[in-house]
Structures are given as structure tokens and as C-alpha cells.
Image: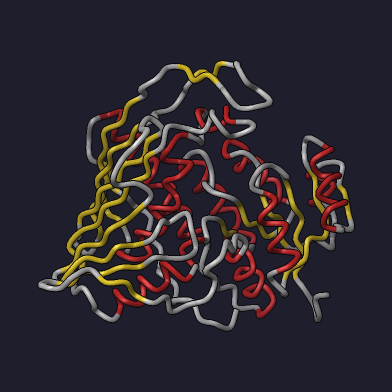
Amino acid sequence: MKSGKTVKIGFVGVGAISGIYLENITKKFDNIDVIGVCDLIRERAENAVNRYGIPKLYNDMYELFADPEVDIVLNITRPDEHYEVTKAALEAGKHVYSEKPLAATLEQGRELVGIAKKKGLLLGGAPDTYLGAGIQTCRKLLEEGLIGDIVGAAGWMLCPGHESWHPDPEFYYKRGGGPMFDMGPYYITCLVNLAGNVSAVSAMTKKTFKTRTITSAPHRGEVIEVDVPTFYAGTMRFESGAIGTIITTFDVYNSANNNCLEIYGTKGTLYVPDPNMFDGPVRVMLAGEAKKDIDLAFRYRENSRGLGLADMAKALSDGSGKFRANCDQTLHVLEIMEGFAVSGNEHREIEISSRFERTPIMDTGL
């Protein structure tokens, strides 16, 4: 039983990722409660209400937005729906925390941030994995100067796609999806938190397969028309002068480098754990020394999705309005990703105009 006053969360979308949010909000984070849920497929919402003892089942999102008990709307709809849902919630006067990406296009993202700031509303969003013990330990090591000044960085996210296991994989190959807009937020959010703002990007992109055949239930045998690039090879110029590279793809079956990041410094290399996870391992290899493991220095080693939402709720409760997974950050990440897409299409370097201020390292008191 949670004690004291909690921030009430209205839940829009009860799809595949909703389970871990519901588990963590109801059992892990003491400062937030789910007050009600809604979904276009009513049965999903009904199942969530019954399983987690949620007080309210809304007929649609507009009924949820009209509920004065809802403090923050949690938007975990499909990527191409994020803009519509978030905009409607903001216009109804609700604070919003959205799954990644902020929106399917930079224009939409800028509009959402503009609405939130004009109305004085908090707008935040995933991913929050970078707030976990693994990447926060990396941030601490970098700030302590363990590997010296950052020279460069590299990241890889390589997989054969989602149609063999996901129950509803079509959206991964539509606007707002693809390997960059789907998985890129984990890697880029991690990179900008470790290395700072990005000032320019370039990329080469391709769509390897025009169609994908679903082999998972319940849509086995259905054919997906692929609308977005499924292979991105990108380069980033950080304001610090460091250079970063990233590959994200749904076209690769095997690789020695996968789901990892490396930060290269003037004194050595930092091996960053999978940005899609909260824990380690964290390793370092300094010049002239063997690679060694580093003990994690922070909490939240287990799957703690919803941590960014809890941090945002704390900022709402204490009136500071300052939280880590904020819209300045999610907009910067969105602009970088769209920059890759535009560069791949137009064969030119793209300047990044947005900036965000890196927030403090996590403490143990949240």
C-alpha cells in the first residue's frame, strides 16, 4: 500500500510495452499511481484494470483527459500516434509523459514542445534507461576524467527485425518506426547524456527488403509493405568536437558488435552497456592496461521503465518543474534522428539547431 499523496497517472494505450510500466508504477514507485486506463482495444484495458486493480476504465482518451483526477497522461500508443495523443492531452491542460519518440517528425515535435511551454505544462518522455545504474555509472566515470577528454564514440544496434516474434509488428516498418526511430532513441539519448549536444549529422540509409512476411501469431503469413529505411549508418559531430558513429538496422542476423556503445577518450576506452537496459556491465581499458570491470555505483539495475515518469512526477509535486527526461532532450534526440533520415535521402550534412542542458547525475533518493 502506497502512503501519502501520489501523482495520478492516466494511461493511454495498453499494448506490448504496457506490462512493465504497470508493474513498476503499481509496485516499484511510491510517488505515482495509475488512476485509470484506456485503449482502442477495450479488452486490453479491461485486462489491465482487473490484473492491477486500477480504479477507472475510460471509454476513450478524451474521457481520460477530462478527468480532473488525472495529473499526468502516460502516452504509450504507437509511434505515429504519439503526436495526436500528446497534443490532445496538452490542449486539455494535462502534463504528458510519452513513449519514444516524441513524435514521428521534427515539425510535430517542435509543435508539441511549443504547446507545453506556452501552457506551462510538463512534457517528458522515454527512454529512461539511461537513468539506470549502468549508464549513470558511465556518466560518473566520464565526469571524473577516467578516460580523459572524449575523442569519439560508436554504437551498434543490429537485428533481423521484429516480424518473427512481435504480435503486431507492422508499425515498426511505418512512419515513426524503423531501426532509427524505434531503437535509435536509446542510443542517441545515452550518447548525448555522456558526450553532450550534437551540432551536425550525416548518414547513408537504405531499405533492404521492400516487404516483410510476418511469422509470429496472430498475423502469421501477412505481408508488410516497408515504408521506411531499415539500415542507417550515421555520423554525429558533437559540440565538444568529438565525432560519433552509429549503425541501426533491421537487416542483420549476426554481428560481433551489437547492442553496445563505446566511448573513446584521450586516456582510454569506456565500454557502455546496452542502452536498452538499466544495468551493466561497465568496462574500461586505459592506455597500457588490461580491460577491467567497474562496479555499478547507482540504483535501478533491474528493468525500471517508468523511472523517468516518477522523476517527472517528483518535479510536479515539489513545484520545481525540473526533471531529467524532459522535452528539450527528447526534441534534440528527435532532431538528430530526422537529420539522419534527411541526410540519407538528400546526401548532405544536416545542422542540428536544438540544444538541451544535461541534467544532474542520478542520486539514490528518488
Up the image or down, 44 lies above or below 189; here it is: above
Rendered residue at 35%/68% (across/down): 282
Q: x, y (%) of residue 97? A: 63, 57
For this rendering, which residue is in front, 214 or 235?
214
- Residue 94 is left or right of residue 172, and the answer is right
Q: x, y (%) of residue 268? A: 17, 69
- Residue 340 is left or right of residue 160, and the answer is left
Q: Report which quarter residue 94 is drawn in.
A: bottom right
- Residue 34 is left or right of residue 223, and the answer is right
Rendered residue at 41%/67% (across/down): 135
Q: How many marks?
A: 0
Up the image or down, 35 lies above or below 99; here it is: below
Rendered residue at 64%/47% (across/down): 17
Q: x, y (%) of residue 308? A: 57, 65
Up the image or down, 220 lies above or below 305; here it is: above
Up the image or down, 84 lies above or below 95; here it is: above
For this rendering, which residue is in front, 297 or 349?
297
Rendered residue at 37%/33% (across/down): 253
Q: Report which quarter residue 340 is drawn in.
A: top left
Q: Which quadrant: the C terminus?
A: bottom right
Q: Which quadrant: the N terminus?
A: bottom right
Q: Identify the colour scheme used.
A: secondary structure
Q: x, y (%) of residue 77? A: 65, 42
Q: Report which quarter residue 116 is drawn in.
A: bottom right
